[in-house]
Image: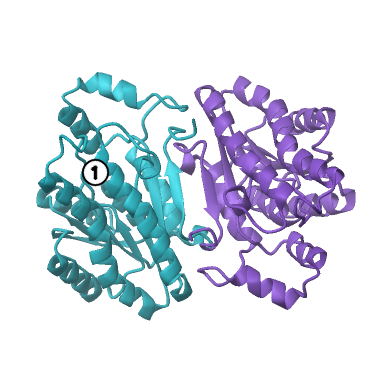
Amino acid sequence: MQLAGKVALITGGASGIGRATALLFAREGAAIVLADLNADAGHRVAAQITQSGGRAFFEQMDVTQAADCKRLVERAIREFGRIDILFNNAGVIRRATVLELSEDDWDRVMTVNVKSIYLLSREVIPHMQKAGGGTIVNTASGWGLAGGAKAAVYCASKGAVVLLTKAMAIDHGPQNIRVNCICPGDTDTGMLREEAQQLGEDHSRFLAESAKRPLGRVGTPEEIAQAVLYLASGASSFVTGTALVVDGGGLAG
Amino acid sequence: MRLENKVALITGGTSGIGEAVAEVFAREGAKVAITGRNESRGHAVTARILQSGGKAVFLRTDVRKAAECQRAVDETLRSFGRLDILFNNAGVFFPQTALECSEEKWDLQIDINLKGTFLMSKSALGPMIAQGGGVIINNSSGWGLVGGDKAVAYCASKGGVVLLTKAMAVDHGRQGVRVNCVCPGDVDTPMLPEDARLRGLDWKTYLAGCENRPLGRIGTVDEIAKAVLFLASDDSSFMTGAALVVDGGGTAD
């Protein structure tokens, strides 16, 4: 077990990559703090972990609200005594050009995808410092490194996540806090289906298009979770400030 | 054991990162063939693995020679019946500006670091594709992504390795071969004191310079080996064409 005795806080933990990571981390011995807006799905993931003999609780919260972030971290410390791993994974997408994008949607994507990392990290880092270290993993995207069509605000937000990751790595490396991000390519999650819907495209054609990359398929949430595990565990003890691309070769060409 | 029944071929396996990778792979259940130019060091590494109950052979190989690369692959297949993982790790470094670097030293670094990766991959891809897939990991460097002082041929060779990695990932993903590279920062290998000596710097001053990065220390060969293990194992099944930076945050800024 690679995370025995560790406590991991995971935002966007009710579905997709967050859920797969929570289940994997729990199997690797970590106690899990699950945060999400979606209470039904969140409680189900927590129940699945506890029924398998793991430790977990779910907290319904909004990562864009400073008070929610503070309350979440206080509860995590109260129940589990520490936070070793913070996985800033909550995210939303709007498939639109800047001409099509409303200001409200711009603000929404930027606050959920980027500001939340700031709000939650500033609550968690003091506890990590006190404990002598920790690991933060942020979910960026292949579209945090390269541009994509009709994805202006998503690209802007994920590009910000990549560089926020590097800046935090520089600030907190001396305190033994490692900060890295993952850059997934298209992965079989609810978000991918939602993109097809936002673009008004046929579902199966959209998925076939997404599979066009050297490995010839989209990723699974479990495959992204394995990359998060690598970055969260001691196996990556000399890795900080890195953007780990997990995209079936989508950005290679 | 994460590499059970796998066969790995590791170039430059007689010291430093290659030696550490050979030992980690063997512990994880792989049969390992290691190449190098120093016979006595090579046999010392295989003897240690054999004593721990692993399987290993040493194949004296100059990766600059196509015929020797082909023979290394043939001998690996003859010894162990298949080839699942190729770690192109053999490398040399001479700290020189373009003015100081002789044509001979330029050729040496490009031929071992870059052309050797091409030649070994060329020989290994056939059997990998025939058996339905495989994994190639190339050892690049942080200096394959950013420039460094007095390192013209090395930077050129390692930058070449990063893009050779991506190009091979694009070509061979559909054939089930994943190709990735690691980009280590300064690591406790024999290459480091040798670099200090060639630069005419005393070890203490030189080391302090190397440690000047967010994590405040140089890496260990084991930490790089764990990154290579992650890329070699199925845990990274959706990764190809990626450059995994393992440098204590050295290139975060």
Colour that chain A carries in the picture: cyan
Q: How is the image coloured?
A: by chain
At x 21% / y 52%, what residue is drawn?
Answer: A110
Q: Which residue appears at 59% of the width and 50% of the height? A: B183
In the image, B139: left or right of A18? right
x, y percentage for residue B163? 58, 37
Looking at the image, is A215 positioned above or below residue B195?
Answer: above
Q: Secondary structure beneath disc 1?
A: helix
- The reply to whether residue A98 is in sight is yes
Tell me where residue A172 sits by quadrant.
bottom left
List x then y, in percent, for residue B228. Answer: 59, 48
Residue drawn at (72%, 61%) of the image: B189
Residue B90 drawn above or below residue A147? below
Q: Nearer the viewer, residue B70 or A250?
A: A250
The correct choice, above or below, for A77 with respect to A228 in the image is below
Tag 1 residue = A153
Residue A45: horizontal and vertical position, in percent?
21, 50
Say whether residue A136 is left or right of residue B97: left
Q: Residues within 10 Å of mark 1 (few under 14, many from 20)?
A: many
Vertically, is B238 above or below A13? above
In the foreground, A122 or A145: A145
Q: Which quarter of the rendering shows the N terminus of chain A? A: bottom left
Q: What is the tally of numbered marks visible in this picture?
A: 1
A152 with respect to B218 (left or right): left
The answer for which chain carries disc 1 is: A
Chain B's shade in the image? purple
Amino acid residing under circle 1: Val
Front residue of this view, candidates A124 and B92:
B92
